[in-house]
Image (spheres, rainbow, N blue to C red):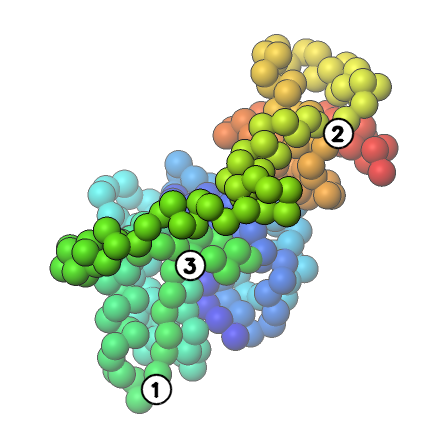
Amino acid sequence: MSVYLIDYENVNFSGLEGVGALNEGDEVVLFYSDSSSTIPMNLHIDVQRSGASMRYIEIRKTAKNYLDFQLAALSGYLVGTTDQTEFIVISRDSGFDSVLDLFNTQDFVGRKVHFSRQDSIGGMIPVKRKASARKTAAKKPAAKKAVKPVEAKAPSENGKRPAENAAKALGTKKPDISNAFKAQIRLKVKDMNLKPTDYTKIYNVFSSASDKHNYDIGLIKAFKDQELGNRIYKATLSVFNGKG
């Protein structure tokens, strides 16, 4: 059982990815404002299916670190008034690390609690924290002794370095999509005034998405525009459903 405190201004809808895997007993507290107040319908559905309790806290004022201070204050309140021991801050803002350091090194309520920070609920990939100036300085001599060419000499199975193979794979891979599908997609979005490069983005997401959820999220990320991504998704979903 865990508490997820989401800085929605910072991570937006991507911070909710993985919410469908939560269970009863988990709690999600989402801090949002006028500038970040929309959630894709598929994520709404995942929230309902998860069984986790969901609390929305609207930030009505705008000021530097306004949301951050409120999130930090509520985290302390929850530590003192609940039996939860695992707290995860969903944000890329390293300023929250001061909250982590406080609760991970103190025992205020007669029990041990653990705080961590990551960029989404389901990613479980901790956000990297910057090393202090003292630690960085101490590591510099060791870094000079670490000879990078030794790692670069390690060949892969075809005799080429891993980096070369990775670059080749990324640089030469083409979208696995037929001309028929491309034609159907162009027909569905013909009235959206898209650029040729926009069509390429759609083809790439179309060919790589494993299901309609990933297709929707992929389009929003590719265009960096939730409204446009959702419009393209709705217009081309029937074509995507036919590719299987």
- The CA distance from mark 2 to mark 1 is 54 Å
For badge 3, the amino acid type reads: Pro
Crowding at dot 2, Cα within 10 Å, few <14 / some 14-19 / many 20+, comes out as: few
Q: Which mark is residue 126?
A: 3
Q: Nearer the viewer, residue 196 or 41?
A: 196
Residue ID for mark 1: 111
Rendering quarter of residue 168: top right
Q: Nearer the viewer, mark 3 or mark 1?
A: 3
Residue 43 percent across, percent down from the top left = 61, 48
| Local SS, label 3 | loop
Residue drawn where x is 39% and y is 55% of the image:
127
Q: Nearer the viewer, residue 189 or 182?
A: 182
Residue ID for mark 2: 176
For residue 152, side relative to residue 238 (left or right):
left
As drawn, 112 above or below 44: below
For residue 99, side relative to residue 84 (left or right):
left
| Local SS, label 2 | loop
Which mark sits nearer the N-terminus, 2 or 1? 1
Residue drawn where x is 33% and y is 65% of the image:
74
Count of numbered marks? 3
Q: Nearer the viewer, residue 112 or 134?
A: 134
